[in-house]
Image (cartoon, rainbow, N blue to C red):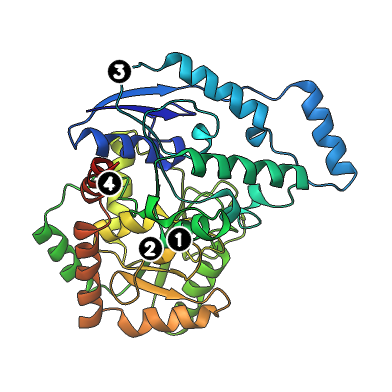
Amino acid sequence: MKITYLTTYDSENIENWSGLGYYIKLALKNQGYDIEAIHAELKNENNLYKSIKILSRILGKGRLDWNREPFVIKDYCHILMKQTSKNTDIFFSPGSPVFSFFETEKPKVFYTDATFGGMLDLYPSFSQLSQHAINNGNFLEQLALDNCSLALYASEWAANTAIKKYNINQEKVKVIPFGANLENKFTFFEIKDSIKKKLNDKVCRLLFIGVEWERKGGEKAVQVAKLLNEMGLRTELYVVGVKNLPSEQPEYVKNIGFISKRTVNGYLQIVKLYIESHFFIMPSMAEAFGVVFSEASSFGVPSISHDIGGIPSAVYNNINGKLFKIDSEAEQMAQYVFNVFGTSEYEKLSLSSYNTYKTLLNWEVAGSKINNYLKEI
């Protein structure tokens, strides 16, 4: 069976969309599908639109969104349609906008982490939009959902948003959590051994990976580390990938900077950080899923975060981590870490985290589930 895989970027580049476009395509390929990957970039804003955008902000009418202007998406869809082969069986995309105006009688399937309506006012890029931009976003999302044969989402939160906000038949909406976008070559016994060694550590190492410091809850992570040190547990917080980390940080905050997974050295450095960390902490204020939680689980590292958005489909309480309410105090997270660090409970939680990765949060499992759903359409 042949699948035409459609993206707005080069899906071979694992630095695009956290590597999800690449790994979703690979998961399909590993199920035996013949994949034809086609991508075309959205056209750039013209000068007139830029001027209108500025004027809209000045008048207090909110931001415009070029990437969700119907005429832009329609043109983009037509460009893709001209490149596709007629002998394909299924059109597949890691995003819904592609199918807003994509004309074909063949099945259309998308797999993503959120709907426009779910992201509205949740992420900075989806905040302070004009009514015009909001109407366009909902219009395109509705079209894509109406036109698709199958809508796959990474979380229950996203799936429920599609069903409730866009009144879509729940029979064509399915949930498949994303896998880890970092290949783990360790065996179960090697992971188990690493967990055993960490039980005797005197220093608690917390790992934070993310670009957006504020949205990902960076300050709260620092506060947790501070409290743990004050409680008598020497703690270090390793920060990776943050673009604008505030310069004034305590000595126990270790700024590693950006690490590219595309290089051998970068891959090895990230693996080392995961394998040596006791907890992955990312108390996001908004999150559609969080592939880093899947990655942490793959190394037997429990995650700590907030019960918000799609995170509960990646982190399960007392199974591969602990979720706290969005308005919880840093003290609650710190006390949790303090109580389980170095105990048999920590060992059990870490092994359970790895098991969650092996049974749920990996691309082999995701690919198999996609395959089963594709057979039904």
**Dot 4: few (<14), some (14–19), or many (≥20) neighbours within 10 Å?**
some
The amino acid sitting under disc 2 is Ser
Q: Badge 3, how many Cα within 10 Å: few under 14, some, many 20+?
A: few
Quadrant in the picture for residue 143: top right
**Which numbered disc covers residue 310?**
1
Residue 237, quarter of the rendered image: bottom left
Element marked by disc 4: helix
Q: Position of residue 272 (x, y in %)?
A: 28, 52
Residue 301 falls in image quadrant: bottom left
Residue 115 falls left or right of residue 202: right
What distance separates the C-alpha of mark 4 from that of mark 2? 19 Å
Q: CA distance from mark 1 to mark 4?
A: 21 Å
Element under disc 2: helix
**What residue did someone put label 4 on?**
373
Image marks 1 and 3: residues in contact by CB distance under 8 Å? no
Label 4 or label 2, whichever comes before in sequence order:
2
Give the label on residue 167, or none: none
**Marks 2/1: CA–CA distance:** 6 Å
Horizontally, residue 60 falls left or right of residue 141, namely right
Q: Amino acid at mark 1?
A: Gly
Q: Verify CB contact (< 8 Å) between mark 3 and mark 4.
A: no
> Residue at label 2?
313
Residue 155 picture location, percent across and down: 41, 58
* Mark nearer the N terminus (1 vs 4): 1
> With 371 as the anchor, is 12 left or right in this view?
right
